[in-house]
Image: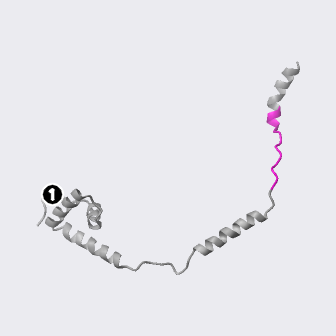
């Protein structure tokens, strides 16, 4: 039996299966799914898929990255502290600065 109202978008049906809807939306979709021959099997397959995902084992990596990362950070920090500190370069006057100041100096002397 087909429901007289248009079917909701797939995203809404997926959110319904995930339990991510507000109560009013959930009630409306439950009524539609209960009466719609197209949406009911789709929601049932989404619920089955959700159960299968929940049943999967929790993946844990075969190795721990934390010791490797900490070792690399410590090596980088010791390498940075082993380098001698560079003295700041003395500021050199630039030619264009002198070119801009020359007319002012000439006017001051005149």
- The spot of residue 45 in percent (x, y) is 25, 73
Q: Please name the residue that numbered disc 1 is placed on.
A: 5
Give me the residue at 57% from left, 74% from top: 65
Vertical placement of residue 98 versus 25, above or below: above
Q: Is residue 50 magenta?
A: no
Give me the residue at 34% from left, 79% from top: 55
Q: Which portion, as a residue range, is magenta?
A: 86-98
- The spot of residue 49 in percent (x, y) is 30, 74
Quarter of the image with the C terminus in it: top right
Question: On the picture, is 93 further left or further right than 54?
Answer: right
Say which quarter of the image contains residue 41: bottom left
Question: On the picture, is 32 further left or further right than 46?
Answer: left
Give me the residue at 80% from left, 57% from top: 85
Question: On the picture, is 90 further left or further right than 71?
Answer: right
- The spot of residue 70 in percent (x, y) is 63, 71
Vertical placement of residue 86 versus 41, above or below: above
């Amino acid at each position: 039996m087909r429901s007289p109202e248009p079917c909701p978008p797939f995203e809404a049906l997926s959110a319904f299966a995930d339990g991510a809807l507000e109560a009013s939306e959930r009630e409306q979709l439950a009524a539609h799914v209960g009466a719609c021959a197209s949406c009911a099997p789709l929601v049932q397959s989404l619920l089955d898929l959700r159960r299968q995902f929940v049943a999967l084992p929790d993946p844990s990596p075969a190795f721990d990255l934390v010791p490797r990362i900490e070792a690399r950070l410590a090596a980088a920090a010791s390498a940075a502290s082993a380098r001698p500190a560079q003295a700041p370069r003395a500021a050199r006057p630039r030619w264009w600065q002198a070119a801009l100041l020359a007319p002012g100096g000439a006017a001051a002397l005149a």
